[in-house]
Amino acid sequence: MNPYNYAENEPVGHVDLWGLQAVFAGEGRLVGYIVQKGQGPTQIAQDLNQNYSCYLSCEVDYIVIVEANLEKFENVVDANGNIKDKSSAEYKSGNIQAGDYLSIPGGKHDEKYIKRVEEKIHALEQKIDSLEDAMREEDRKAELEEEADLYEPEPGDPGEGIQLAKGVNIFLRERRQKKRLQRIEELKIERDKLEQSIEAGGG
């Protein structure tokens, strides 16, 4: 097998961590399978279910293998797009060869990966909560300042300096709040991506 077409041309992202038939992505999710000599989709499904079930979100059968790799099994699909029964002799006509890479749907992340991601999500949510608390506290202080008339000039004072100070304070407060809000949005995007990565892996 050419090293440049290993794992669908993604040898970095799709790696065989233990030198076995199953291929795992960098985050520990089962994504593919390296065909061994004499194997067809039925034997591959059997091997996956028996030896890698903890990495699968559901049981795999030969139809799942074929549907995920139709370009390698064109002769076992009839004119109507239906997959022929596994008893068909056409499965023995050399659709796949030893060393071929097959995509395997239904892989899920291992528990250690899920735990690490969940810890990151929790840390992000804590940062979000902290920033939201800071924004609420900033708003509360602004309301107190308005109620206390801290910026009202004394009798006989034209108040220009006080009004300028008030304007500067409002400007700085709004800028702080804007930065906090932007950071919150960035953290939420990062959190959502992590959550989606778990969902995509069947975690």
Image (cartoon, rainbow, N blue to C red):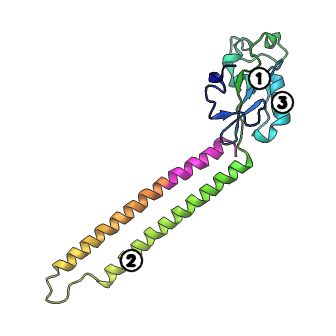
In the drawing, what numbered circle is on residue 35? 1
In the image, is residue 17 above or below residue 137?
above
Name the one closer to the observer, 49 or 117. 117
Residue 149 drawn at (x, y percent): 28, 83
Q: Quadrant of residue 76?
A: top right
Q: What amino acid does circle 1 point to? A: Val
For mark 2, does the 10 Å Cα neighbourhood hold few (<14), some (14 to 19), or many (20 or more) residues? Answer: few
The residue positioned 21% from the left and 79% from the top of the image is 162
In the drawing, what numbered circle is on residue 53? none
Q: Secondary structure at mark 2?
A: helix
Q: Quadrant of residue 143?
A: bottom left
In the drawing, what numbered circle is on residue 141? 2
Q: What amino acid does circle 3 point to? A: Asp
Residue 94 drawn at (x, y percent): 77, 11
Q: Is residue 202 magenta?
A: yes
The disc, 2 or 3, on the residue closer to the chain's N-terminal end is 3
